[in-house]
Image: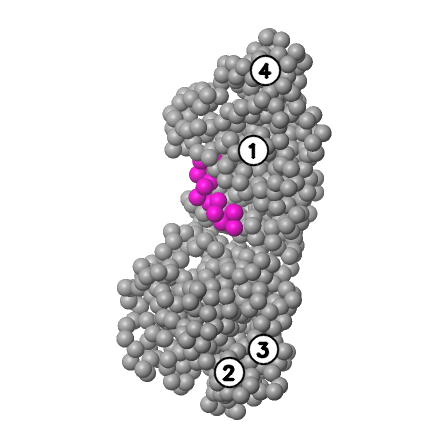
């Protein structure tokens, strides 16, 4: 293809792959001679400086051009949303703010363009636009949505309604740094962003150094956004009504000199004079918003501009490219020519991007550095006598969590239903619930390390977000309700599998399982979530742990604290249960995947592979009945089922901080070899998959089917066919 002007002979190497170069803008000789960000500076001198304004607009158009060049090269990707706020993003960078996050995965092409321009992508061996084109939406390249592996980008983004968690977590850990995050008016419709910000602001009223940047462009993916009918006054009132002290809105319509119809306007259609006026307003108001957020006010910046401004289409039609939208199609060619910059413009933009914020994002943003962690020393493990008095496992773990929090001031535990309800009120007593009202009866006050919003998403989001940012956390939930927080936890574990640096594993404690929730009925009996985690174990960096007692849970948590870049779930009861293992047995179980609790010789041997603590009760009863029949029994507690897969079953070798520990065939035979195998779990049968895949003997599975109101755990298990009588009968059938 030919360029709009003859291609200059001295094109910088990084511009290889740019198809069109344009004429120099008017007044380029005045405002384009030297970079607006001076050498040794991190930002432009003033948001009102005409040269700074001029070069900010140049940068915004460079972002638009690159997005379209790169997405067009694959006829795939999402340019429209980011395009409608390119001036706001450019303003943030030109003002020196590079710790920018997003909740909009569809903004990925814009973010990639930004980290290309500041040379961050050179860490991925991407030096030219052509290389960026080649590796966009390709394996080991630039994923269609932000992930954990892209240099200079702070957070993954896929499902809507998650970005604020990362921004708030980062703000909590880095109080002097601004963390803007882009929020779409489609994502604004998710139930989570506003409520989670409101709880955070109540808990941490002085932590306001995160800045939502609402991209109000009137459209979502396939139609008008649900807030498109609001007036500016109504939008401002909405955010003020949700606790924002400062709501700053810049509307492109106020600068329109082309009489565009409708409430949402494309600033790229303005005269250059009006484009610069609009950019100046964005710069000045972003500067005001940033200083407000850093100065202690909960602030939001809103840019109102038509979706797709400056790219190939407008409205929802600009949201993504289709197979017809190739670099040879007229709509893409025309849009690229319209946005084409002169070579001198590209050189200027790159120099500003390199200098902004003190250097490339890959060398300056907070996630490029390992967060310093406090020394914990030895955890105060307390080993109970096997066969002694029953103990509550969660309470035993609570004592260790309290120790971690007392040693590590950045540690946080989150819980929607309340720690007291999970048998870990000892954590509240030691660490205190964060609440503006001081009340010693409830162990609460303004300073604390227990975060309790009534939203599993907010709990999981804060705990997982902090872990991704480098801090230690625990997310505690009732097993039955955790599903509402799992999407962001899954996002973080996947990102951790890709990270280029170390971060503490994200650890959970799931309590009050279905078997303990009899009187509450099926609404509180949803252990199907274990199937979710069983599927995630195949990632290779997810470990679902099932300690059988109060001794085991302590060793499980102690081990989890030593791991990096993993997702570790610990599931345990809050009821007093028998002590069946020593510390050493669990250490062995964590390594091998399981541990033998009891073995009785007989003519034939039935192996019970048991996931969980309460299901051991009917299994031990069945073992006694089988022994009386002369049948041998081996009871195996499955503590760490991920170890029981075969190496080829999981993606462990693709993970950062890869853990390739799997039980070999000889070890598996020693644990599970016999004449018959019965898998038993009070949760989802999928958690037994690693064992059932490898076993070669006659076998069967007893697992959760559905919930019902019951007076006891035994009655719930009976309803699901998990009783000593049924297990005994089936064992006899299998060996005869």
Asked if 315 appears above or below 486 in the picture, the reply is below
Q: State which tag comes first along the sequence, 3 or 2.
A: 2
**In the rendering, at what x and y percent does residue 361 appear?**
59, 67
**In the rendering, at what x and y percent does residue 196 appear?**
43, 52
Q: Is residue 610 magenta?
A: no
Q: State which tag comes first along the sequence, 4 or 3.
A: 3
Eye-nearest disc, 4 or 2: 2
Which portion, as a residue range, is magenta?
478-491
**In the rendering, at what x and y percent does residue 302 appear?**
39, 67
Residue displayed at 45% across by 41% down = 483
Mark 1–mark 3 Cα distance, whole angstroms, equals 52 Å
Taking the image as shown, residue 606 lies to the left or right of residue 249, namely right
Asked if labels 1 and 4 touch by Cβ distance under 8 angstroms, the answer is no
Mark 4–mark 3 Cα distance, whole angstroms, equals 72 Å
Residue at the disc numbered 4: 735
Eye-nearest disc, 3 or 2: 2
Mark 4–mark 2 Cα distance, whole angstroms, equals 79 Å
Taking the image as shown, residue 292 lies to the left or right of residue 36, namely left
Eye-nearest disc, 4 or 1: 4
Q: Is residue 489 magenta?
A: yes
Q: State which tag comes first along the sequence, 2 or 1.
A: 2
Frontmost residue, 623 versus 93: 623
* Local secondary structure at mark 2: loop
Residue at the disc numbered 2: 2
Frontmost residue, 357 versus 603: 603
The answer to which image quadrant residue 371 occupies is bottom right
Asked if 167 appears above or below 131 in the picture, the reply is above
* Local secondary structure at mark 1: helix
Q: Residues within 10 Å of mark 4 (few under 14, many from 20)?
A: some
Residue at the disc numbered 3: 15
Q: State which tag comes first along the sequence, 4 or 2.
A: 2
Q: Which mark is residue 689?
A: 1
């Amino acid at each position: 293809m030919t360029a709009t002007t003859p291609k200059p002979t001295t094109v910088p190497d990084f511009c290889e792959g740019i198809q069109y170069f344009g004429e120099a803008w008017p007044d380029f000789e005045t405002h384009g001679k030297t970079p607006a960000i001076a050498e040794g500076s991190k930002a432009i001198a003033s948001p009102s400086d005409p040269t700074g304004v001029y070069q900010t607009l140049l940068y915004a158009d460079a972002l638009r051009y690159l997005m379209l060049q790169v997405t067009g090269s694959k006829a795939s990707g999402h340019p429209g949303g980011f395009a409608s706020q390119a001036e706001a993003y450019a303003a943030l960078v030109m003002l020196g703010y590079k710790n920018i996050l997003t909740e909009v995965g569809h903004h990925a092409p814009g973010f990639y363009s930004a980290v290309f321009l500041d040379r961050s992508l050179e860490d991925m061996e991407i030096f030219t636009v052509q290389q960026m084109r080649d590796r966009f939406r390709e394996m080991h390249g630039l994923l269609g949505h932000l992930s954990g592996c892209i240099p200079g980008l702070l957070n993954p983004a896929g499902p809507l309604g998650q970005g604020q968690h990362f921004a708030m977590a980062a703000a909590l850990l880095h109080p002097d740094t601004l963390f803007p995050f882009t929020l779409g008016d489609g994502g604004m419709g998710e139930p989570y962003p506003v409520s989670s910000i409101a709880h955070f602001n109540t808990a941490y009223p002085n932590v306001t150094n995160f800045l939502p940047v609402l991209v109000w462009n009137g459209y979502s993916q396939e139609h008008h956004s649900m807030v498109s009918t609001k007036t500016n006054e109504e939008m401002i009132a909405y955010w003020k009504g949700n606790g924002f002290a400062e709501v700053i809105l810049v509307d492109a319509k106020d600068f329109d000199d082309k009489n565009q119809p409708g409430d949402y306007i494309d600033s790229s259609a303005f005269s250059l004079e009006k484009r610069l006026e609009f950019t100046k307003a964005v710069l000045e108001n972003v500067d005001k918003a940033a200083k407000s957020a850093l100065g202690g006010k909960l602030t939001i910046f809103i840019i109102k501009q038509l979706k797709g401004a400056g790219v190939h289409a407008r409205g929802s039609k600009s949201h993504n490219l289709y197979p017809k939208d190739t670099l040879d199609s007229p709509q893409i060619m025309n849009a690229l020519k319209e946005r084409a910059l002169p070579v001198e413009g590209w050189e200027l933009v790159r120099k500003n991007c390199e200098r902004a914020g003190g250097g490339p994002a890959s060398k300056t943003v907070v996630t490029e550095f390992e967060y310093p962690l406090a020394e914990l020393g030895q955890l105060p493990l307390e080993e109970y006598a096997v066969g002694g008095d029953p103990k509550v496992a969660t309470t035993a773990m609570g004592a260790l969590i309290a120790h971690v929090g007392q040693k590590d001031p950045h540690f946080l535990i989150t819980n929607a239903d309340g720690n007291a309800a999970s048998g870990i009120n000892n954590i509240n007593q030691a660490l205190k619930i964060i609440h503006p009202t001081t009340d010693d009866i409830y162990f609460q006050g303004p300073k604390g390390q227990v975060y309790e919003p009534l939203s599993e998403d907010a709990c999981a989001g804060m705990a997982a977000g902090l872990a991704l940012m480098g801090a230690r956390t625990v997310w505690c939930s009732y097993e039955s309700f955790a599903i509402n927080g799992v999407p962001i936890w899954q996002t973080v574990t996947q990102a951790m599998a890709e990270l280029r640096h170390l971060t503490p594993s994200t650890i959970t404690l799931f309590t009050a399982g279905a078997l303990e929730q009899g009187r509450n009925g099926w609404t509180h009996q949803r252990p199907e979530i274990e199937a979710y985690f069983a599927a995630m174990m195949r990632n290779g960096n997810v470990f679902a742990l099932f300690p059988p007692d109060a001794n085991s849970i302590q060793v499980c948590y102690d081990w989890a604290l030593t791991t990096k870049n993993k997702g570790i779930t610990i599931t345990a009861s809050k009821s007093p249960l028998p002590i069946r293992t020593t510390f050493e047995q669990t250490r062995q179980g964590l390594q091998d995947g399981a541990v033998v609790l009891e073995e009785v010789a007989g003519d034939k041997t039935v192996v019970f592979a048991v996931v969980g603590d309460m299901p051991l009760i009917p299994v031990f009863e069945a073992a006694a009945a089988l022994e009386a029949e002369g049948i041998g029994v081996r009871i195996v507690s499955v503590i760490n089922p991920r170890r029981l897969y075969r190496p080829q079953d999981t993606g462990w070798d693709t993970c950062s901080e890869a853990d390739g520990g799997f039980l070999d065939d000889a070890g598996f035979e020693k644990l599970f070899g016999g004449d018959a195998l019965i898998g038993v779990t009070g949760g989802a049968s999928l958690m037994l998959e690693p064992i059932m895949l490898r076993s070669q003997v006659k076998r069967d599975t007893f697992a959760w089917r559905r919930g019902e109101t019951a007076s006891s755990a035994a009655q719930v298990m009976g309803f699901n066919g998990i009783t000593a009588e049924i297990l005994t009968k089936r064992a006899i059938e299998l060996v005869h």
